[in-house]
Amino acid sequence: MAYESILFQSADGIARITLNRPDRLNSFTSAMHAELREALAQVSGDRSVRVLLLTGAGRGFCAGQDLSDRAVAPGGAPVDLGESIENNYRPLVLALRSLPLPVVCAVNGVAAGAGANIALACDIVIATQSASFIQAFCKIGLIPDSGGTYFLPRLVGAAKALELLWTADFIEAPEAHRLGIVQRVVPDAELKDATYALARQIADGPQIPVRMIKRLVYQSLKLDLRTHLDLVSSHMSIVRQTADHAEGVAAFKEKRPANFRGK
């Protein structure tokens, strides 16, 4: 379908969603949320897609919520922010995290508020040298939405998360990398190539193990060790029977690159 607030491309196993409101720093509107839900459903239902890339157009990744989209007419009732979260941000975060395939986020500039937390909902974040992150909610008398109070403590620890959430300080890309908020920092001009290279490397890998690894890592965060090891054993019994496992072993013995086909 044709989109107005995002760009969607898919080729050779890699899908790319670009937030495309550069004049508003790709801030969220209800229309953008609807288009994102449609695009993510399309990715989820397409078995040919092996990796999803998420990025923003222009000079920033996403400035969070477009407050003008919530403008209230004089004398009108205030916007129910809880309803907005329930209808838009909650489904978006859950859709990103429930995708069985890897999601790589390329942050090109500022990621503020909900924009920062949508990046954290992805599996891997690559940022430019000029990128920055800010949890701006306290500055406008709100609490973080989009999973900020969930993802940030798991990445940086509870005390550091509280500091960042309370102060609403900007975190520049090198510091975000040191804290574990982003996994790679690259020169601004190299973001597109670096992100695609990583996505290509993952997409060329054995897709059944790739998806199982994602599932196991996130499940491990809420399971005890014994239960997790039991899950690993059951998953290993499946992947050892795949054609990709046989191809990987053969390629190793023959000292050649493996040609994984995802079966």
Image (cartoon, rainbow, N blue to C red):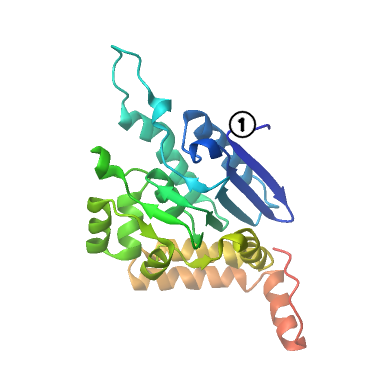
Residue at x 53%, y 68% (from the top left corner): 235
Residue 150 lies, with reference to residue 234, above or below; the image says above
Q: Quadrant of the C terminus?
A: bottom right
Residue 13, position as x, y percentages in the image: 70, 56
Q: Is residue 222 visible?
A: no
Q: Is residue 78 visible?
A: yes
Residue 37 lies, with reference to residue 166, above or below; the image says above
Which amino acid type is marked by label 1?
A: Glu
Element assignment for label 1: loop
- Using the image as rendered, state which of residue 200 and residue 179 is in the foreground: 179
Q: Is residue 186 left or right of residue 175?
A: right
Residue 217, position as x, y percentages in the image: 45, 66
Among the 4 quarters of the image, the one containing residue 45? top right
Residue at x 59%, y 45% (from the top left corner): 18
Q: Quadrant of the N terminus?
A: top right
Q: Is residue 174 left or right of residue 160?
A: right
Q: Which residue is mark 1?
A: 4
- Using the image as rendered, state which of residue 136 and residue 85 is in the foreground: 136
Residue 77, position as x, y percentages in the image: 29, 16
Residue at x 54%, y 64% (from the top left corner): 212
Residue at x 24%, y 61% (from the top left corner): 158
- Using the image as rendered, state which of residue 252 and residue 108 is in the foreground: 108
Residue 86 lies, with reference to residue 239, above or below; the image says above
Residue count near mark 1 (Cα–Cα under 10 Å), binned few <14, some 14–19, many ≥20: few
